[in-house]
Image (cartoon, rainbow, N blue to C red):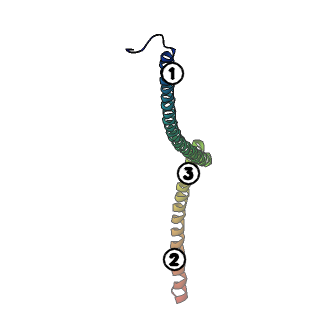
């Protein structure tokens, strides 16, 4: 016998069993590497999920901060609008300016009248002084 005889069934069975064993060994290796890949993929997926969760929390914090800023700005706008509503209108300011101008004119008129009264009072003082001088002269017995 010089090698493998074609007619031997035991030989063919051994070859066939060897092939089947090799196929099963290949399948086992493939499933093992598939499980390892699956484990690696799960680790990557978990890392990505943690990163996404962290970014989502930061985004929610920024959104909450933006909502608070919006509420603060709305309150400031409401205060400004109230202050503007309480402020006098242009028409009211114009009427006030006209009133002040009219009052200035009245003050000038009163000042002029007081100046006229000053002259009357000065004349009255001169007359009173002359009368007092006359009365003093009579009391001394002057002719």
Which x, y percent locates residue 14? 49, 20
Determine whether label 3 and label 1 are within 8 Å by CB.
no
Which x, y percent locates residue 123? 52, 68
Farthest residue toward the front?
A: 1
Q: Nearer the viewer, residue 22 or 129?
A: 22
Find disc 2 in the rendering and name its residue: 129
SS at circle 3: helix
Cα distance between the residues tagged 2 and 1: 158 Å
Q: Residue at x 49, y 15 (%)?
A: 12
Q: Is residue 140 visible?
A: yes
SS at circle 1: helix
Find disc 3 in the rendering and name its residue: 100
Q: Residue at x 52, y 89 (%)?
A: 140
Mark 3 or 1, nearer chain start: 1
Looking at the image, is mark 3 or mark 1 nearer the viewer? 1
Circle 3 crowding by C-alpha within 10 Å: few under 14, some 14–19, many from 20? few
Farthest residue toward the bottom?
A: 140
Mark 2 or 1, nearer chain start: 1
Mark 2 or 3, nearer chain start: 3
Find disc 1 in the rendering and name its residue: 17
SS at circle 2: helix
Which x, y percent locates residue 110? 56, 58
């Amino acid at each position: 016998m010089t090698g493998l005889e074609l007619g031997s069934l035991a030989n063919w069975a051994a070859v066939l069993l060897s092939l089947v064993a090799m196929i099963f060994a290949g399948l086992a290796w493939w499933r093992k590497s598939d499980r390892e890949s699956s484990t690696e993929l799960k680790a990557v997926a978990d890392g990505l999920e943690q990163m996404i969760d962290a970014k989502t929390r930061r985004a929610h914090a920024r959104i909450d901060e933006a909502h608070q800023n919006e509420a603060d700005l709305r309150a400031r706008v409401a205060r400004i609008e109230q202050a503007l509503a309480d402020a006098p209108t242009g028409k009211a300011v114009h009427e006030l300016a006209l009133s002040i101008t009219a009052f200035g004119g009245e003050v000038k008129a009163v000042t002029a009248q007081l100046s006229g009264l000053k002259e009357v009072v000065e004349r009255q003082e001169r007359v009173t002084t002359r009368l007092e001088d006359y009365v003093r002269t009579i009391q001394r017995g002057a002719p």
